[in-house]
Image (cartoon, helix red, strand yellow):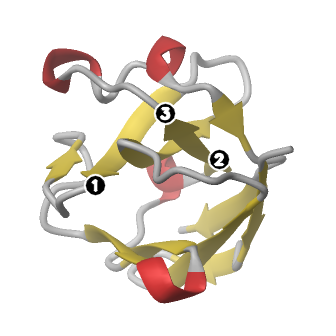
Amino acid sequence: QVQLVESGGGSVQAGGSLRLSCAASGYRDSFNCMAWFRQAPGKAREGVAVIDRDGSTVYADSVKGRFTISKDNAKNTLYLQMNSLKPEDTAMYYCAAARQCPWWLRLHPNVYNYWGQGTQVTVSS
């Protein structure tokens, strides 16, 4: 059974940094894509960043230049380094994994087969 477990969320002031981690277990084959999504209260879940099997990345325009997605295959762990945080980054952040991920849909939540439980990020002004 696939499990994705996020950690690293918390409360920071605007301009601060956080690093999220997602530990993956319970699968035999590599996922084609792993991603971070976020969802603020009353808003739809949105794709933040994606990394594929080869290490290619895609970012939402709202986080480009501030967030960096990476993975450590040896540790089966996905990361999201978040710098220059803004109050509008406040949300529940979710790790997700997809067995297939067409490049034009990589930031769409429907592509992803597995989800973590989420970790809260709160940025105060």
- Quadrant housing the N terminus: top right
Q: Depth check: give the residue in front, 89 or 19.
A: 19
Picture coordinates of residue 15, whole percent (x, y):
38, 81
Task: Residue under label 1, please give it.
Answer: 53
Q: Secondary structure at mark 2?
A: strand
Q: Left or right of 73: which side holds 97?
A: right
Contact check, label 3 and label 2, Cβ < 8 Å: no
Three-letter code, disc 2:
Tyr
Three-letter code, disc 3:
Ala
Q: Depth check: give the residue in front, 6 or 61.
A: 6
Q: CA distance from mark 2 to mark 1?
A: 19 Å
Q: Residue at x 23, y 69 (%)?
A: 66
Picture coordinates of residue 124, whole percent (x, y):
61, 68
Task: Residue under label 2, please give it.
Answer: 94
Picture coordinates of residue 35, whole percent (x, y):
44, 47
Q: Residue at x 16, y 41 (%)?
A: 61
The dot on residue 100 is: none
Q: Quadrant of residue 122?
A: bottom right
Q: Secondary structure at mark 1?
A: loop
Q: Residue at x 16, y 26 (%)?
A: 103
Q: Secondary structure at mark 3?
A: strand
Q: Left or right of 25: which side holds 73?
A: left
Neighbour tally class for label 2: few under 14, some 14-19, many 20 plus, Cα within 10 Å: many
Neighbour tally class for label 1: few under 14, some 14-19, many 20 plus, Cα within 10 Å: few
Quick check: 117 above or below 99? below
The dot on residue 98 is: 3
